[in-house]
């Protein structure tokens, strides 16, 4: 073990978006969506539909979701989504969508009829042609039923992502995810029978009792289905979730398992797209979304929307009682409340540059220096000289006249590099956020 390994934790935080929602604050005054989107490109938007319901809450989960939602609440939520969609269409008279995704929660918690209503809303109210663009939908072993998958296939969903986490029943229980291997295999069989273009399987490493041998067993069990994509997630213990805190030994275990998993998938012919994502060459590219260049329109109380200078959403929480309260409030909102942005973060020039750097650098392909220069009128190696020089000295980063790219070891430390590139303003807001 090197001095670098002992001095820097590789697991500070998963950066799937910058800034994190804990940096969002109530917007005063609340801007009208018509003004928020005025002047923005709307010819290649990403549509995200958020369903905040699950059949169970896993021990590692900090998603904005609630369990056991009764049918009447789901119906009221879809009613609210329709009011929100109408308000959005009034603010964006002619939106054009290039890709779409339905996430959660677990979207397939909805019944087939409810799923059809959701898709009708996107098509009839917003004008999204879901059959003509890449459409990704998340599911779970318990809800990937034949009738629900038939709805997704009928809407020509191109990608289905299923959270398996482990093919070892004892490990699934340790992650507070009660499921049986037989249920997982049956769900995967139904997904393959429905013939979606891309199957993604999520797996988690760092679970109590997991060993390199059992980790490879789960990887091989997933590979038996020859998924077009695999996501390997390190287990995080987050505030207000069902698992306890761990120590530095756990960091070492996760890093070892990451390397085992990475090498195993590379040997199996997969290419690494990021620290987490692995893909069969020639598949899956149509479902990717580049949030550096495209706007994102989110529907639902946990969804984000991105413009060039404003990210906005609704209140954020993890604890079950707070999530329930936010959802209960959301479904009662009158139509006029959906015509404004409520909670968000205004990006200044520094944060736009940092966002572009973080979202690009954490990809295995790296960041094109010319693209950064074209957008910001400066060289990234000048704007972030101190940070990038440090990573280069650690052996985590390499650059030439065209690219700035993480090395293999740098990718392993993505969850340390990403948070370290946050602006001081974002860090202060996140530190001041009160977990709930």
Image (cartoon, helix red, strand yellow):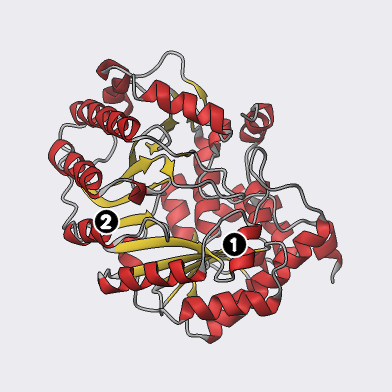
Q: Position of residue 45 (x, y in %)?
A: 28, 45
Which residue is under mark 2? 148
Say which quadrant the N terminus sits in.
bottom right
Q: Secondary structure at mark 2?
A: helix
Rendered position, 340 above or below 5: above
Mark 1 crowd level (few <14, some 14–19, many ≥20, 10 Å Cα): many
Q: How many marks?
A: 2
* Labels 2 and 1: the sequence-earlier one: 2
Taking the image as drawn, is residue 232 in sight? yes
Residue at 33%, 27% in the rendered image: 36
Rendered position, 224 above or below 299: below
Tell whether 149 sits left or right of 211.
Answer: left
Q: Position of residue 109 (x, y in %)?
A: 36, 47
Tell whether 429 sits left or right of 160.
Answer: right
Residue at 64%, 28% in the rendered image: 433
Which residue is under mark 1? 172
Mark 2 crowd level (few <14, some 14–19, many ≥20, 10 Å Cα): many
Q: Nearer the viewer, residue 72 or 358?
A: 72
Rendered position, 423 above or below 290: above
Image mark for residue 150: none
Q: Nearer the viewer, residue 349 or 71?
A: 71
Q: In terms of image quadrants, where is residue 310?
A: top left
Q: In terms of image quadrants, where is residue 5?
A: bottom right
Pointers 2 and 1 in contact (C-beta within 8 Å): no
Q: Nearer the viewer, residue 272 or 308?
A: 272
Q: Position of residue 379 (x, y in %)?
A: 54, 53
Tell whether 65 sits left or right of 198.
Answer: right
């Amino acid at each position: 073990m090197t001095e670098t390994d002992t001095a820097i934790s590789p697991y500070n935080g998963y950066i799937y978006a910058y800034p994190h929602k804990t940096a969002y604050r109530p917007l005063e005054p609340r801007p009208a969506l018509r003004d928020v989107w005025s002047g923005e490109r709307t010819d290649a938007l990403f549509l995200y539909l958020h369903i905040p319901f699950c059949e169970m809450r896993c021990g590692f989960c900090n998603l904005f979701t609630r369990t056991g939602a009764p049918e009447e609440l789901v119906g009221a939520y879809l009613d609210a989504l329709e009011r929100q969609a109408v308000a959005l269409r009034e603010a964006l008279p002619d939106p054009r969508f290039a890709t779409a995704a339905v996430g959660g929660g677990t979207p397939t918690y909805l019944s087939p009829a409810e799923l059809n209503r959701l898709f009708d809303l996107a098509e009839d109210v917003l004008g999204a042609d879901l059959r003509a663009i890449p459409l990704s939908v998340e599911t779970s072993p318990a809800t990937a039923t034949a009738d629900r998958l038939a709805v997704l296939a009928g809407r020509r969903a191109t990608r289905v992502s299923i959270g398996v986490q482990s093919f070892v029943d004892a490990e699934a229980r340790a992650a507070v995810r009660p499921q049986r291997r037989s249920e997982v295999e049956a769900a995967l069989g139904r997904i393959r029978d429905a013939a979606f273009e891309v199957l993604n399987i999520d797996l988690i490493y760092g679970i109590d009792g997991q060993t390199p041998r059992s980790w490879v067993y789960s990887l091989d069990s997933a590979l038996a289905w020859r998924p077009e994509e695999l996501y390997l997630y390190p287990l995080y213990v987050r505030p207000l979730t069902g698992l306890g805190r761990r120590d530095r030994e756990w960091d070492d275990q996760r890093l070892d398992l990451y390397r085992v998993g990475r090498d195993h998938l590379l040997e199996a012919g997969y290419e690494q797209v990021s620290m987490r994502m692995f893909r069969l060459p020639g598949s899956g590219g149509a479902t990717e979304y580049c949030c550096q260049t495209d706007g994102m329109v989110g529907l639902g109380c946990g969804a984000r929307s991105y413009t060039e200078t404003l990210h906005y959403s609704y209140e954020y929480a993890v604890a079950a009682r707070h999530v329930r309260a936010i959802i209960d409030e959301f479904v009662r909102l009158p139509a006029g409340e959906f015509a404004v942005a409520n909670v968000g973060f205004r990006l200044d020039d520094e944060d736009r540059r940092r966002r572009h750097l973080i979202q690009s650098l954490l990809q295995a392909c790296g960041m094109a220096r010319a693209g950064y220069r074209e957008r910001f009128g400066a060289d990234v190696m000048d704007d972030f000289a101190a940070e990038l020089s440090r990573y280069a000295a650690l052996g985590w980063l390499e650059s030439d006249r065209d690219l700035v790219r993480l090395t293999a070891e740098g990718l392993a430390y993505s969850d340390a590099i990403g948070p370290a590139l946050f602006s001081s303003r974002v860090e202060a807001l996140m530190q001041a956020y009160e977990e709930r």
